Image (cartoon, rainbow, N blue to C red):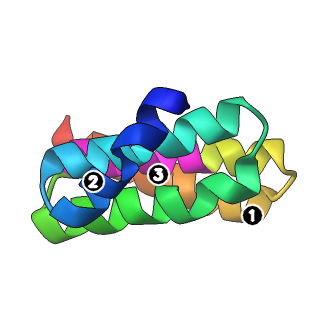
Amino acid sequence: MELLRRHESLAASIATGEHVAWFWNALATALQYIGEREAAEPYFFKAVEVARKGCWRRIEAMALHHWGRSLVEQGRLAEAESRISEALSIREELN
């Protein structure tokens, strides 16, 4: 978390780029893994948003998948199913 937090302002200043989507996903996933799942959600959203704008389907699927897992851990199963289904659809599209 310390390493990721040190680079958060840089990622925010860049705003676009596939590497930025990967960064937001990494930060969100780190928050998820330390139990701060609700705090992770805006970062999962950012990762997906940046990925969609750039048409980077691989990271979009990854972020949606991890977001879905985080939602499962919160007991928010309907939302989780939606995210995970969307991730699966992208992965099938990418073969």
Local packing at callout 2 (Cα closer than 10 Å; few below 14, some 14-19, many 20+) is some
Res. 11 mark: 2
Res. 78 mark: 1
**Residue 48 percent coordinates (x, y):** 36, 61
Q: Is residue 85 left or right of residue 33?
A: left
Secondary structure, magenta segment, majority class: helix
Q: Quadrant of residue 29?
A: top right
* Numbered range of the magenta stretch: 57-67
Query: Which residue corresponds to the image point at 18% horizontal and 43% vertical from the top-left?
Result: 19
**Residue 44 percent coordinates (x, y):** 49, 56
Local packing at callout 1 (Cα closer than 10 Å; few below 14, some 14-19, many 20+) is few
In magenta stretch: residue 61: yes
Local packing at callout 3 (Cα closer than 10 Å; few below 14, some 14-19, many 20+) is many
CA–CA distance in space, label 2 to label 1: 31 Å
In magenta stretch: residue 14: no
Label 1 or label 3, whichever comes before in sequence order: 3
Verify CB contact (< 8 Å) between mark 2 and mark 3.
Answer: no
Q: Which residue is mark 3?
A: 64
- Secondary structure state at the residue bearing disc 2: helix
Label 2 or label 3, whichever comes before in sequence order: 2
Verify CB contact (< 8 Å) between mark 1 and mark 3.
Answer: no
- Secondary structure state at the residue bearing disc 3: helix
Looking at this view, is 24 or 84 the one in front? Answer: 24
CA–CA distance in space, label 2 to label 3: 19 Å
- Which quadrant, please, contains the N terminus? top right
**Disc number lying in front (2 or 1):** 2
**Residue 72 percent coordinates (x, y):** 76, 46
Looking at this view, is 6 or 26 the one in front? Answer: 6
**Disc number lying in front (2 or 3):** 2
CA–CA distance in space, label 1 to label 3: 14 Å
Inspect the image, locate mark 3, and give the three-letter code of the amino acid beneath it.
Answer: Leu
